[in-house]
Image (spheres, rainbow, N blue to C red):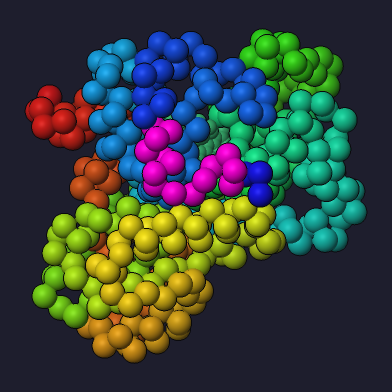
């Protein structure tokens, strides 16, 4: 699998990629990050997203490595981008119905694909990279083969999907989730909603031929091929905000089992909080990412990342079980291990959280990392408001009050 050759799903690779990238996280990154230099040419950005998305490497670790080498000002652009991920997670936690609405739109759009042959043909051509728009077709192939696209390419691709090809937003977000190694319910849904003019109501992102030519170093120039205007896409409006989650308190004296999932492959912090599980299991939620079957590399990334986690935990994990796929299977496993509680790192909005809602027989204790608990409540409105909290959040991590 080409994607996993590029993104070996283990923590050691994530950390060594971070070490190699950190020296370039200041001016180099700021001036070059928007360039999409083609398959295999993405050294201008960190390519850490599959590791961050599954928390094989954590945000505090990335911030720490970068701030050991650069001032906050010098690495400001990179730090902002990293906090976009945190912002998206917090924003969706406080508005979880957006994920439910996305699923509703996906089911509806999929029904239309099956009944409207014109739509089906355009959707198939887009997914196969056979639209005749050379840059778009290249990105469709790159995504399917490598599981990755540069951020600017994701923006252009989503814009062309919505405004030139006039395809439904949910089908585009689904195409990404089925192929990205970093596919994330928050960053992907919000990324598509941002391009489509739903996140910042009415403000759409229109891809322009001249911008594509400049930032692909002249590889592509889709002159006269792209829509010239972008009316907001159809989709649920932003709902009212709920309170941010605080997470559960862990009582390590109770008989516990540990459940690992794709959202936190660095659960060592739970052991530091006193957890001594009798047994540990991994969840397999890849089939809950889409109505269709995700690409093989997407599931393989998650399975191997969780295997890497179990290997690191060693004997501390107790007896191990792999790949539970339903709430019933989780309950049965925990009961057989004689547990009083199932402990799991707080699963943010997405497939693992969806599955765990169905576990009723035993309490599921979901402690939340300090980083998330402090950062998420700041996603009250747009990113620029959230940004005001960044100095303080960094100060707490670095042990300096700002
Ligand atoms: C339509 C669309 C869909 C997207 N879908 C996803 C997704 O499913 N998963 C995902 O992780 N990101 C998604 N992004 C955000 C962004 O494109 C990727 O995080 C980034 O390209 C990953 O590459 P990198 O690690 O080399 O990023 P770098 O530029 O090196 O940035 C470092 C880290 O910061 C975070 N980051 C950077 N840019 C963004 C951003 N714009 N939004 C949120 N976080 C960011 C990522 O965790 C990234 O690993 C999407 C963006 C768009 C426009």
Query: Measuring 22% from the left and 54% from the top, which residue is drawn there?
Result: 269
Q: Tell me where residue 361 sits by quadrant.
A: bottom left
As drawn, is 244 to the left or to the right of 101?
Answer: left
Percent position of residue 56, x then y: 39, 48
Observer-nearest residue: 192 or 51?
51
Quarter the C terminus occupies: top left
Q: Is residue 273 visible?
A: yes
Observer-nearest residue: 402 or 15?
15
Q: Is residue 349 visible?
A: no
As drawn, is 201 to the left or to the right of 86?
Answer: right
Specify the principal SS of the magenta part: helix
Q: Is residue 213 above or below residue 296?
A: above
Q: Is residue 222 above or below residue 401?
A: above
Q: Tell me where residue 15 sits by quadrant.
A: top left
As drawn, is 108 to the left or to the right of 190?
Answer: right
Query: Measuring 15% from the left and 60% from the top, which residue is drawn there?
Result: 273
| Magenta part of the chain | 4-18
Percent position of residue 235, x then y: 60, 46
Query: Measuring 68% from the left and 61% from the top, which residue is drawn there?
Result: 293
Percent position of residue 290, x then y: 62, 59
């Amino acid at each position: 699998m080409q994607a996993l050759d590029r993104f070996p799903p283990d923590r050691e690779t994530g950390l060594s990629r971070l070490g190699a990238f950190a020296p370039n996280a200041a001016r180099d990154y700021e001036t070059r990050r928007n360039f999409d230099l083609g398959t295999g040419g993405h050294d201008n950005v960190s390519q850490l997203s599959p590791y961050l998305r599954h928390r094989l490497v954590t945000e505090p670790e990335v911030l720490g490595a970068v701030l050991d080498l650069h001032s906050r000002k010098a690495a400001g652009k990179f730090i902002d981008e990293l906090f976009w991920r945190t912002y998206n997670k917090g924003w969706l936690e406080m508005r979880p119905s957006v994920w439910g609405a996305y699923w509703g739109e996906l089911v509806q759009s999929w029904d239309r694909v099956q009944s409207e042959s014109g739509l089906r043909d355009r959707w198939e051509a887009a997914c196969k990279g056979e639209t005749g728009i050379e840059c778009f077709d290249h990105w469709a192939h790159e995504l399917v083969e490598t599981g990755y696209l540069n951020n600017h390419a994701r923006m252009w691709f989503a814009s062309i999907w919505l405004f030139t090809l006039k395809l439904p937003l949910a089908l585009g977000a689904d195409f990404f989730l089925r192929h990205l190694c970093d596919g994330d319910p928050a960053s992907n849904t919000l990324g598509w909603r941002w391009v489509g003019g739903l996140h910042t109501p009415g403000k759409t992102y229109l891809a322009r031929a001249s911008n594509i030519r400049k930032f692909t170093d002249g590889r592509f120039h889709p002159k006269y091929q792209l829509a010239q205007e972008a009316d907001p896409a159809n989709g649920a409006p932003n709902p009212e905000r709920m309170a941010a989650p605080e997470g559960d308190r862990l009582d390590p004296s109770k008989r516990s089992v540990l459940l690992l999932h794709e959202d936190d492959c660095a659960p060592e912090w739970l052991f530091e909080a006193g957890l001594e599980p009798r047994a540990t299991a991994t969840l397999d939620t890849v089939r809950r990412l889409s109505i269709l079957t995700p690409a093989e590399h997407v599931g393989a990334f998650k399975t191997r990342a969780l295997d890497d986690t179990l290997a690191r935990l060693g004997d501390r994990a107790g007896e191990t079980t792999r790949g539970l796929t339903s709430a019933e299977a989780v309950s049965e496993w925990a009961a057989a291990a004689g547990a009083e509680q199932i402990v799991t790192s707080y699963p943010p909005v997405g497939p693992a959280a969806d599955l765990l809602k169905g576990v009723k027989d035993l309490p599921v204790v979901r402690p939340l990392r300090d980083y998330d608990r402090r950062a998420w409540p700041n996603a009250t409105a747009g990113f620029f408001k959230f940004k005001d909290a960044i100095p303080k959040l960094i100060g707490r991590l670095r042990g300096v009050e700002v």
